[in-house]
């Protein structure tokens, strides 16, 4: 069975939580100053190539080890054929080291002190037969990233925010979906990118500035390289000129997000065990959860010496 390859450049569906602001500045790395401008259609996308050792565990938590760093490897139902072909390839050859086409997944957390994590979603794998596709265009660890260049509140490194590309079919799907499914489908992926001397500054929201004076994030299209261990991407080349106007995309409304968050909190409260009643309760012979307080030891009184 021939291995499957990328058939459509869609925006990835990584989890991203944006709740608290961050005042930290971006971190930069030195990158080549020469830019390569290519003519490409403006779409949101995040796709690339990695090479690593694949491990399929019995509990379904697959991983890929790049160098000495291990990352989760996800797959959707649409990639079942690709996954089975990859497993068969490894079984037949005994070679766990494979070249994969993947979507990057950046997982952010509400607390600033908790760093983001990187994972990958399987799209295809390369047996050296895809010279004119993504795996043929990119070197190992290289990615095509297209999205809004901006800071998000929970990440100190600026990100390329990849949203769902607009289509009439997707719009109809969203109209017929309940809020939870709608929000999950339209969730953006925020890919942290180190880009020194970028031609445009990443947009940063300022709550003290009026909305009409905020400006907006610029749409950029770049080639970047994943930096294992650092869990960020480093700028390699600009593949299209930055655009003030982004392509049409889908984004969940604040109302739908609020509805989903409210429902999630209610579900958590319903699943939580009842709080213990206030007040002292006497322990019974059948109650082995009440532990009597340990009283502090009292020192024995010194004996008085008497004269003979």
Image (cartoon, grey):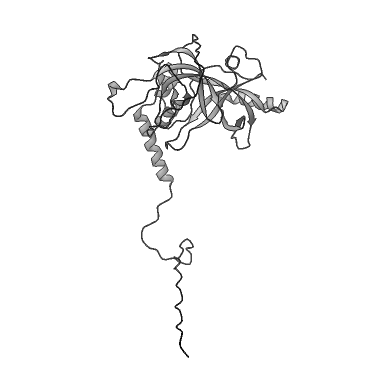
List x then y, in percent, for residue 306: 45, 87
Residue at the extreme front: 307
The quarter of the picture where residue 82 lies is top right
**Horizontal side of residue 223 vs 171, given as left or right:** right
The quarter of the picture where residue 92 lies is top right
List x then y, in percent, for residue 297: 46, 70
List x then y, in percent, for residue 231: 52, 30
The quarter of the picture where residue 139 lies is top right
Which is more toward the observer, 152 or 234? 234
Q: How many marks?
A: 0
List x then y, in percent, for residue 251: 39, 24
Question: Is residue 267 at least partly visible in the picture?
Answer: yes
Residue 252, placed above or below residue 59: above
Question: Is residue 162 at least partly visible in the picture?
Answer: no
**Horizontal side of residue 59 vs 33, given as left or right:** right
Which is more toward the observer, 110 or 181? 110
Residue at the extreme top: 39
Residue 36, placed above or below residue 229: above
Q: Residue at x 47, y 60 (%)?
A: 289
**Horizontal side of residue 263 vs 194, given as left or right:** left
Residue 59, placed above or below residue 42: below
Task: Locate the N terminus by quadrant.
Answer: top right
Q: Residue at x 46, y 88 (%)?
A: 307
């Amino acid at each position: 069975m021939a291995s499957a390859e990328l058939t459509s450049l869609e925006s990835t569906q990584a989890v991203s939580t944006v709740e608290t602001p961050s005042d930290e500045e971006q971190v930069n790395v030195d990158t080549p100053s020469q830019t390569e401008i290519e003519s490409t259609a403006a779409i949101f996308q995040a796709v690339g190539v990695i090479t690593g050792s694949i491990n399929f565990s019995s509990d379904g938590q697959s991983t890929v080890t790049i160098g000495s760093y291990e990352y989760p490897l996800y797959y959707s139902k649409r990639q079942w054929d690709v996954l089975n072909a990859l497993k068969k390839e490894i079984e037949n050859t005994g070679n766990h080291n494979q070249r994969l086409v993947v979507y990057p997944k950046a997982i952010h957390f509400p607390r600033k002190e908790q760093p983001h994590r990187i994972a990958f979603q399987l799209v295809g794998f390369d047996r050296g037969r895809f010279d004119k596709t993504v795996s043929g265009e990119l070197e190992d660890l290289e990615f095509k990233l297209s999205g809004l260049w901006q800071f998000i509140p929970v990440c100190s490194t600026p990100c390329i925010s990849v949203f769902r590309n607009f289509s009439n079919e997707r719009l109809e799907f969203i109209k017929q979906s309940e809020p939870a499914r709608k929000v999950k489908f339209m969730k953006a992926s925020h890919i942290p990118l180190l880009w020194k001397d970028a031609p445009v500054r990443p947009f940063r929201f300022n709550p003290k500035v009026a909305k009409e004076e905020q400006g907006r994030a610029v749409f950029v299209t770049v080639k970047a390289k994943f930096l294992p261990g650092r869990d960020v991407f480093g700028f390699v080349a600009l593949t299209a000129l930055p655009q003030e106007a982004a392509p049409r995309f889908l984004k969940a409304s604040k109302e739908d997000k609020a509805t989903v968050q409210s429902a999630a909190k209610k579900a958590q409260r319903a699943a939580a065990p009842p709080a213990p009643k206030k007040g002292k309760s006497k322990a019974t012979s059948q109650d082995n959860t009440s532990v009597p307080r340990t009283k502090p030891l009292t020192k024995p009184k010194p004996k008085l010496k008497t004269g003979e």
